[in-house]
Image: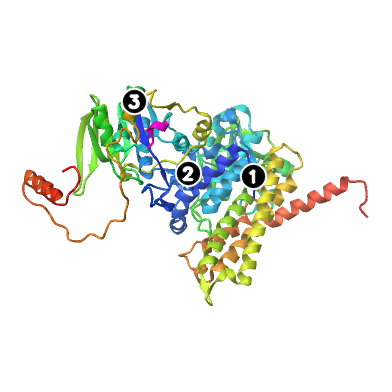
Amino acid sequence: MHIVACIKQVPDAKDVRIDPETCTLVRQGVESIVNPHDWYAVEAALRLRDEYGGKVTVLTMGPPQAEEALRETLALGVDEAVLLSDRAFAGADTWATSLTLARAIIKLGPVDLVICGKQAIDGDTAQVGPGLAAHLDQPYTTYARRLELQDGGLLLAERLTDMGYEVVQMPLPAVVTVIREIGDPRMPGLKHKMRARKQEIPVMGAADLELNPEEVGLQGSFTQVVRVFSPPPRCDREMLTGEPEEQAEKLINRLKEAKVPGL
Amino acid sequence: MDYFLTEEQQMIKEIAAKIATEKIRPIRAELDESEDFPWEIMKILAQSDLFGVYLPEEYGGLGGGVLENCLAIEELGRACIGVATTYAASGLGAYPILLYGNEEQKQKYLPVIASGEKLAAFGVTEAGAGSDAGGIQTTAKRDGDDYILNGTKQWITNGGEAEIYTVVAITDRKKGARGASAFIVENGDPGFSFGKKEKKMGIRTSATRELLFNDCRIPADRLISREGMGFIVTMKTFDVSRPGIGALAVGLCQGALDISVEYARKRVQFGKPIISFQAVQHMLADMATETEAARALVYAAARYIDSEAKDISKFSAMAKLFPTDVAMRVTTDAVQVLGGYGYMRDYPVEKMMRDAKILQIYEGTNQVQRNIIGQELNKEYGRIKETFF
């Protein structure tokens, strides 16, 4: 069983500032941490490995210093870590990020299960996990609070919903995103930490992944951040009713009225 | 202050500090109140490999020494010395085997202690034998291939929770101090049982029980070293373990200082934070200075012991005596800095003050430490021929 846990290095939320000119996060002088939700992905992967055997690889895309985040996960007993780092990857949106990660997972393959945190605390999109599944053409589920392997290469997941929880079953290979209820991340171990200090972490760039520069980073992104602002307080909300098709039509009309670009 | 720790020593500190902050600190008040044994935390310490920091690599340890042990103890003690005492007491139980055990005993017991799979404990004290270890009444009689133990050990830390006990018993009363021997007793040995958990003033999460030996039969290969070595095993064990008590004290002091300074910066009286008043500032300054001095002494003594020096008793006793007396003052002053809040159980410093007291008592009272230091001075200067006048 080969499990890949994807993590992201994010600025420590305790001191986040936004550059008013570029509308992006100011990363200089801000300490980086492993996205808190991703620790649950790593823990989920380790628990499955401990129970069913196999190995866990942790994968991240980021600048060279993201290696530190990978070493932190190695200290928990992760078997291998891979860093995707290339100037060409800079400015990637969730599409380009998930494409790049997916390509790396194929290169690392065969991989039975990919686990992500539910979202990153900087972008908060929660799109990379499902995006990965789309690029890998694999089944996926989100917000899993419990995972269990079943005979015949099946994964059983309990996913939390607003109303309760759903139990879903899917064939492996698959992609899941997990939440806090999956279990507290373990503490680092001294022996793992000492090994982590020396362990080699392979770095892969666009060429290694056989990706063209226009497929990755800012160039490969379909979205870009135009403006960042604090949302106005919620008021005059309106619920659209009717059949899903009706609701969708109403929504499109309202967006057109609001002159949303592209509609 | 930079104590020029190695990268590995730094890692020990970091991991112990992370566990202390994230896992121990949030539940220390609850553990103090419930007096429950901290099994959950012991499991975490085991998974993090902390039980083996001072044990050789061939027995599953990390190959460190007394300093490594002290660093882990200090960081855990910064959150709760009840938990840290439990951790340190397993080391105390392991030291006699490490120092005087034969190869089979080391192979059998040290790896499971290093992995944290089993806790150890050390049993010397009895109702009539505290500072005066010569008063030990527990006996061990040779019977064929076995020894039969009879008697009661009192106030044994980790008693009832540990699996492996090193116990001192009299094998030949006629020989006095040379008639004591050290044995390994396992939980489950026939005739071995425990008294009830004692109700203590502080370190209430740690387990303190009687060890009851009622015709307890153990194989003769459980004898550590030779018959008659019991007191030497005990004294040499304490020589290497006592800086650990100093480390508990340093951790406790640091924990109390952290809270005191943070509080003094926030607490406003007469329109100003109380840290701006010299009366409070000077208390904090003394607390910080004494804490740092205690830490420096513990580290220096630990390093000296790890250098395999022979004359360690005096420095080891100093590294227990000074930090623990400091801890009593620092925690008392921490309560004073927090005033009425400090006296309330909603705040952590009253527990720290209650916890501090035991440090001056166990593993040799501070009066006994002064005896050791005084006797060593007498011996040391007796050997010097020159005069200093």
Q: Amino acid at mark 3?
A: Asn
In the picture of the structure, the residue carrying the numbered disc 1 is: B241
Q: Is residue B365 left or right of residue A210?
A: right
Q: Residue furthest bottom?
A: B270
Which amino acid type is marked by label 1? Ser
Q: CA distance from mark 1 to mark 3?
A: 62 Å
Query: Quarter of the image holding residue A92?
Result: top left
**In the picture, residue B241 is in which quadrant?**
top right
Residue depicted at 66% across the width and 39% down the height: B181
The reply to whether label 1 and label 3 mark residues of one chain is no
Residue identifier under label 3:
A212
Foreground: B351 or B214?
Answer: B351
Q: Secondary structure at mark 1?
A: helix
Q: Where does the image place residue A21, in percent across and percent down from the top left?
A: 38, 50
Circle nearer the N terminus (2, 1): 2
Res A261 quadrant in image:
top left
Quadrant of the rendering where the N terminus of chain A is positioned: top left
Numbered disc 2: secondary structure: helix
Numbered range of the magenta stretch: A85-90
Q: Which residue is mark 2?
A: B42
| Residue B74 on image: x %, y % | 58, 49
